[in-house]
């Protein structure tokens, strides 16, 4: 794919996850791959073969564990940032002090690789990715490339990576490493450590402002990063390598690292954070801590974590319940993706009991319902208000999170008639066709599983569907922006985190958000826009158009990015049939129109 073709893809592919994946990594024109370098959007049979196990597995465990797990986000009474694994940078701890006060005391005598991996297997996880070297530059294995490693600098003389690799083979999990290839805060030639070495902090494009420092970054990559990656491949034969923060180093160096991996381990699966603006590697990675996923048409993976930190941080008590991750998993698989769920073990090598409780809760559900996720793929149906849908061949699995009070479940957009409908664990379900596009199932009065009850529909042939979003006859229909299409320059999806599942950079009058909706019957709706604004002075106007009608809206500023307004725009009458609903700016006096989350339609009659 040429540079021009990639640029066109980045500009035009607004209905996919691509904007979410590229922009948090600081995409610039210089980041794009050179002509002739295959991207994720190019056909590649070798890549398809590499990722086959990853697509089948669907659920993995991400582990952030290092010397930073000991202080657990606090050093000398000072609390670091959100991520405890960033303690060295967030508190600007000098390398020499970090070595003496954080590295050398690290002694995880409670570490038990067998217990870790057995717990992961019981949780239904099929692969493990663990931090071999995070941004602090410390190797959690006996590296011969750098003495800044576990066995050389601490009293712990075992090799936890070898023990985990063996345990994964024992319990049938694939195994691999997270490796911070771009940021390294201990190395004087790498970027990120501005407090010791006066180096750039790692802002994207620093190499254009400081070309004289590229030679140092090259020495780091060729002297430490690539040799350690080759070392990990030779010592442990990983199935997957997970890279991060590629925007912190020149794109050419990221491509050298990619080439080195391909040469040393042609079958190793690599994530898109290797570099190239998110279009290299074998699959796309989302931003950290995603809460909502747009649709993307290549293999992808999301990385939620149990609280808000990736490393162990006991002061962060925001742990989500098992149901949260079960729902994320069903939603991800239903959109063709994986969940690589993170835990942060303690500094003594023991998994946090809170994380263990979450994993065991997920495992109980997965033991009964795993077939609805493993080896399944994206749903052919539109988004369903009651849950998610996954597919295996000519079978659909309906994941019902919200059990209907009246016992009637509408499967919207399903044009094919199933051979039968049943509970995954239970009897047959009566099915009735409402119209050519909708099927209604009659369910038991109470949900067999309050978290996610799985229903099964089998079909004799390929499943036909209508992807238009069905407008509910009762209750509110929520048209989320990530279920819509973005068109025009600039506008993109947010990164999908909580309160960031919105439009971003909506600063051009020709940029729009569009949904295709379907009204089963003529209805009148009250229309509400939910949004917030980048600044407290943002002003602008917009119009919502559908069925030859228009509603005008005026943006009012919000006090913070976690505060949303819900403005009633007016009423629309939508005749039975399909309609295009579009939101477009009419005035942009302050540049960015708004961060739109969703449009709500409430039936009035």
Image (cartoon, helix red, strand yellow):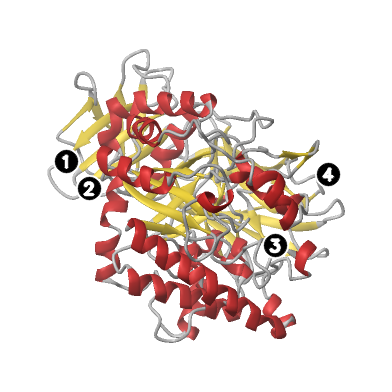
Label 1: element kind: loop
Image position of 337 with respect to 266: above or below: above
* Extreme residue in the right direction: 537
Where residue 402 appears, as percent x and y from the top left, is: 45, 25
C-alpha gap between disc 3 and disc 2: 38 Å
Circles 4 and 3, Cβ within 8 Å, touching? The answer is: no
Label 1 or label 4, whichever lies nearer to me, is 4
Q: Nearer the viewer, residue 517 or 328?
A: 328
Circles 1 and 2, Cβ within 8 Å, touching? The answer is: yes
Q: Nearer the viewer, residue 338 or 554?
A: 338
Numbered circle sitting on residue 585: 3
The residue that label 1 is drawn on is 459
Label 3 or label 2, whichever lies nearer to me, is 2
Going from N to C along the chain, the mark reached first, 3 or 2, is 2
C-alpha gap between disc 4 and disc 3: 22 Å
The residue that label 4 is drawn on is 559
Tell me: 67 left or right of 228.
Answer: right
> Would residue 297 be seen by someone viewing this image from the given angle?
yes
Where residue 128 appears, as percent x and y from the top left, is: 39, 45
C-alpha gap between disc 1 and disc 2: 7 Å
Where residue 8 appears, as percent x and y from the top left, is: 50, 78
Label 4 or label 3, whichever lies nearer to me, is 4
Label 3: element kind: strand
> Would residue 553 be seen by someone viewing this image from the given angle?
no
> Residue sitting at 40 percent across and 17 percent down?
406
Q: Quadrant of the C terminus?
A: top right
Tell me: 584 left or right of 559.
Answer: left
Choose top left, top right, bottom left or bottom right for residue 441.
top left
C-alpha gap between disc 1 and disc 4: 51 Å
Going from N to C along the chain, the mark reached first, 1 or 4, is 1
Q: Quadrant of the N terminus?
A: bottom left
The residue that label 2 is drawn on is 463
């Amino acid at each position: 794919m040429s540079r021009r073709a990639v640029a066109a893809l980045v500009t035009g592919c607004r209905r996919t996850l691509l904007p979410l994946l590229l922009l948090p990594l600081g995409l610039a024109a210089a980041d794009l791959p050179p002509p002739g370098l295959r991207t994720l959007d190019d056909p590649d049979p070798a890549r398809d073969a590499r990722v086959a196990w990853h697509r089948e597995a669907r659920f993995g465990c991400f582990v952030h564990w290092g010397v930073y797990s000991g202080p657990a986000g606090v050093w000398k009474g000072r609390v670091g940032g959100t991520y405890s694994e960033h303690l060295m940078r967030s508190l600007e701890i000098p390398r020499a002090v970090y070595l003496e006060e954080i590295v050398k005391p690290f002694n995880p005598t409670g570490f038990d690789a067998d217990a870790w991996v057995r717990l992961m297997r019981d949780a239904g996880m099929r692969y493990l990715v663990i931090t071999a070297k995070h941004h602090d530059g410390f190797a959690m294995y006996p590296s011969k490339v750098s003495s800044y490693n576990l066995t050389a600098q601490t009293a712990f003389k075992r090799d936890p990576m070898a023990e985990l690799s063996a345990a994964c083979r024992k319990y049938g999990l694939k195994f691999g490493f997270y490796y911070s290839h771009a940021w390294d805060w201990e190395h004087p030639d790498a970027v990120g450590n501005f407090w010791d070495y006066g180096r750039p902090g790692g802002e994207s494009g620093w190499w254009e402002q400081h070309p004289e420092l590229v030679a140092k970054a090259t020495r780091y990559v060729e002297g430490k990063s690539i040799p350690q990656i080759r070392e990990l491949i030779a010592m442990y034969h990983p199935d997957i390598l997970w890279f991060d923060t590629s925007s912190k180093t020149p794109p050419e160096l990221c491509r050298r690292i990619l080439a080195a991996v391909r040469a040393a381990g042609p079958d190793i699966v690599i994530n898109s954070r290797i570099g190239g603006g998110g279009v290299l590697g074998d699959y796309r990675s989302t931003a950290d801590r995603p809460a909502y996923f747009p649709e993307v048409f290549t293999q992808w993976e999301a990385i939620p974590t149990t609280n808000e930190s990736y490393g162990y941080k006991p002061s962060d008590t925001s742990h989500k319940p098992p149901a949260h991750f079960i729902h994320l998993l069903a939603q991800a698989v239903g959109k063709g993706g994986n969940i690589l769920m993170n835990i942060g073990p303690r500094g003594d090598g023991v998994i946090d009991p809170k994380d263990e409780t979450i994993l065991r809760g997920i495992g109980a559900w997965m033991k009964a319902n795993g077939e609805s996720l493993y080896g399944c793929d994206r749903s052919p149906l539109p988004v369903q208000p009651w849950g998610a849908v996954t597919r295996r061949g000519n079978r659909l699995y309906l994941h019902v999170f919200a059990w209907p009070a009246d016992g009637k479940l509408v499967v919207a957009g399903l044009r094919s008639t199933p051979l039968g409908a049943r509970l995954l664990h239970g009897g047959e379900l009566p099915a009735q066709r409402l119209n050519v596009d909708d099927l209604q199932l009659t369910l038991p009065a109470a949900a067999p599983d309050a978290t996610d009850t799985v229903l099964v529909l089998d079909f004799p042939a390929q499943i036909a569907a209508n992807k238009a979003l069905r407008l509910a006859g009762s209750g509110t229909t929520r048209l989320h922006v990530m279920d819509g299409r973005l068109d025009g320059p600039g506008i993109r999806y947010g990164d999908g985190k909580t309160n960031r599942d919105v439009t971003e950079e909506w600063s051009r009058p020709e940029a729009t958000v569009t949904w295709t909706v379907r009204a089963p019957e003529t209805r009148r709706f009250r229309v509400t826009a939910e949004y917030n604004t980048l600044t407290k002075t943002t002003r602008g106007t917009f119009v919502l158009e559908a069925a030859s009608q228009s509603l005008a809206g005026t943006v009012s500023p919000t006090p913070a990015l976690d505060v949303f307004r819900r403005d009633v725009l007016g009423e629309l009458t939508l005749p039975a049939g399909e309609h295009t609903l579009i939101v477009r700016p009419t005035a942009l006096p302050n540049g960015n129109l708004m961060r739109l989350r969703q449009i709500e339609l409430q039936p009035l009659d």
